[in-house]
Image (cartoon, helix red, strand yellow):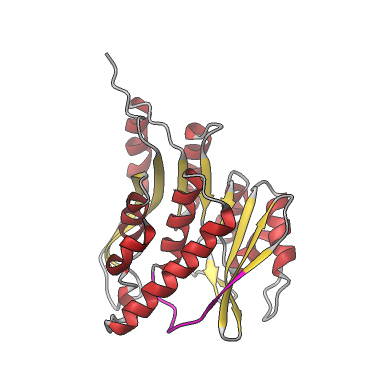
Amino acid sequence: MMQNHNQQKKIALINDFTGFGRCSIAVQMPIISMLKVQCCAVPTSIFSNHTAYEDYYFTDYTSNMEAYIEQWKKLDLKFEGICTGFLGSAEQIRIVSEFIQYFRDENTVAVIDPVMGDNGEAYSTYTEEMCRQMIQLVRYADVVVPNVTEACILTGTPYKERWTTRELAKQIVQTGPEKVVITGIPQKTYVSNLCYEKGKEYEMIRTHKVGHSRCGTGDIFSAIIAADAVNGVEFTKSVRKASAFIKKCIQKSIEMEIPLTDGVCFEELMGLLK
């Protein structure tokens, strides 16, 4: 008799695994678990510590991904959520696209963080082909969480110091996703997130800026958004929760004198997510 492995809500998390430095799967898995959703990870690459450190060990997992995923097909796994993070090659984007098409059904929420660039520039590893493929991948998303740079790349909009983020959000939604939140918009002493849901009003959610930017905060953000989406939490409420939690984590990290490279000490505050 075949066992049913789908008795609990699950999110398939596709991202890199970093042993030290608090980012990617290592951050997202405990947060998704705290929000009472089983987290099932597909590693895209494995790092001893992330690339902001002077030196690191790295293994590309691309050649193993399809065989890994094939075992999940044999187990007949069902996912209420699919969440993607940094993808390091055009081949990985193709694999993720096929993953979403195979595993999604009418109950699956796909959350895509199109980790492509920042501060007006695509990451040095991101080729034009990868940018084109990410634009195609985003069309499969229900929720997209780009920063301003990524929103510009996704819409073919030249980057500038001041943006009409509402127009960027509208253009992204027109390609397929139901919801978009453009993250990390600087507004004097605030950092803002613009939420837009198809057929609804725009909403700008602002939090006071504290400290400096830290590794892994985007991963925390997308993990909360994905788990809340699976749990039926209203979109803007989820964005407020994620923004407030990250701010508290940054404040706690400053208090504990955690180096910027080491991310945020979210472990100290996990109880706030209950």
Q: Is residue 149 left or right of residue 3?
A: right
Tell how many labels. 0
**Residue at (47% x, 33% y) in the render:** 103
Image quarter (top left, top right, bottom left or bottom right) of the N terminus: top left
Image quarter (top left, top right, bottom left or bottom right) of the C terminus: bottom left
Above or below: residue 204 compared with residue 131: below
Above or below: residue 124 compared with residue 73: below
Above or below: residue 3 compared with residue 173: above
Q: Is residue 96 left or right of residue 216?
A: right
Residue at the limit of the structure toward the top, as seen here:
1
**Residue at (70% x, 74% y) in the render:** 163
Write down the quadrant of residue 220 in the picture.
Answer: bottom left
Write down the quadrant of residue 55 in the picture.
Answer: bottom left
Q: Is residue 248 left or right of residue 243?
A: left
The picture places residue 168, in percent across and down from the top left corner, at 70, 63
Does residue 126 appear in the picture of this structure?
no
The picture places residue 112, in percent across and down from the top left corner, at 52, 52
Q: Magenta span: helix, strand or loop, mainly? A: loop
63 or 87: which is nearer to us?
87
**Residue at (57% x, 54% y) in the render:** 235
The picture places residue 19, in percent across and down from the top left corner, at 25, 62
The residue segment tinted magenta is: 205-215
Above or below: residue 220 compared with residue 68: below
Residue 233 among magenta residues: no
**Residue at (59% x, 50% y) in the render:** 138
Does residue 4 appear in the picture of this structure?
yes
The picture places residue 37, in percent across and down from the top left corner, at 37, 44
